[in-house]
Image (spheres, rainbow, N blue to C red):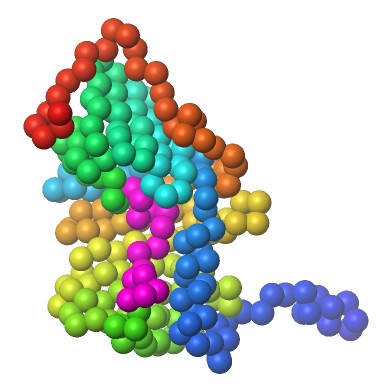
Amino acid sequence: MLIAVQGCGLKPRSGIPADIAPAQVISAIERQSQSVETLSGTASVKVLAKGVSETATVVIRYIKPGLFRLYLKGFAGIDMGRISALADSMTVYIPPENIYLKAGRDEDILEKLFPEMDLNVNMLEMLFNVTIPPKEARENYAISMNRADDQLELSMVQGEAVFRYTLAGRDLRLTSEEFLVEGALIWRKTLSGYTSYDGVDFPEKIAFERGGDSFSIRFSKCEINKELTELDLSFAVPASAERVYIENSR
């Protein structure tokens, strides 16, 4: 009997606390968004854009906020592209063509160079950060919560715009976030398969939907909050590579 009682006592309590307040839920969302300072990992990527499905493997290094390096590999490990995004500049190298391009971060060069992958800087940043109204603007939002079993849904509404977050369990893990305007879904991000990396809970799979297109990334290897610098995000462009320019990228 003693063993049985002790065993039950070791089980973690489940369920969202009955007395939880919206401010606590928002704090939990912000903590998760702020927990990842750096990330190094390998992941499989699947994109469905304009009715066409594409898959790739990506090797990523990320430094918050919004600095990253990506190596894209296609079928049979073919090197498709290398991308470095620093504070105010981007470098893209395309090995099959042996060409490279340099541009500002505000130029949509990823969408132009990799249209089949539906890549853009803002979406990549959203994978690692929660989109939530800033503190100084939240008094302008109507905040409400709904519960269902082991889940809680928090909505922040201003006019026709709605930010909606779904969290699960007593530890309030974020499982989805959505942005709607006039009842229409603008985008949705879902997170699943949380794993602990040196005390930081991070989802194994992140999916993003927007305008009928979808982008999902599943990590097979990941390191969280290991030391990285901007030097770790750069790569050497071969001397033989030709620099090219596209519209609005000079």
Q: Position of residue 148 (x, y in %)?
A: 44, 85
Residue 142 shown left or right of residue 27 in the figure: left
Residue at left offset 33%, top offset 31%: 83
Residue at left offset 15%, top offset 78%: 182
Task: Locate the C terminus and report the quarter of the image it occupies.
Answer: top left
Residue sitting nearer the eye, 206 or 128: 128
**Span colored in magenta:** 124-137
Residue sitting nearer the eye, 82 or 90: 90
Q: Is residue 168 visible?
A: no
Whether 138 is among the magenta residues is no
Residue at left offset 49%, top offset 78%: 25
Residue sitting nearer the eye, 76 or 16: 16
Q: How many numbered tags mark residues here?
A: 0
- Where 142 sits versus 239, above or below? below
- Please, which residue is most extreme toward the front here? 136
Q: Position of residue 78 (x, y in %)?
A: 34, 23
Q: Position of residue 218 (x, y in %)?
A: 43, 47
Task: Locate the N terminus and report the quarter of the image it occupies.
Answer: bottom right
- Where 233 sits versus 33, above or below? above
Q: Position of residue 3 (x, y in %)?
A: 88, 77
Residue at left offset 52%, top offset 45%: 38
Whether 127 is among the magenta residues is yes
- Please, which residue is most extreme toward the left here? 247
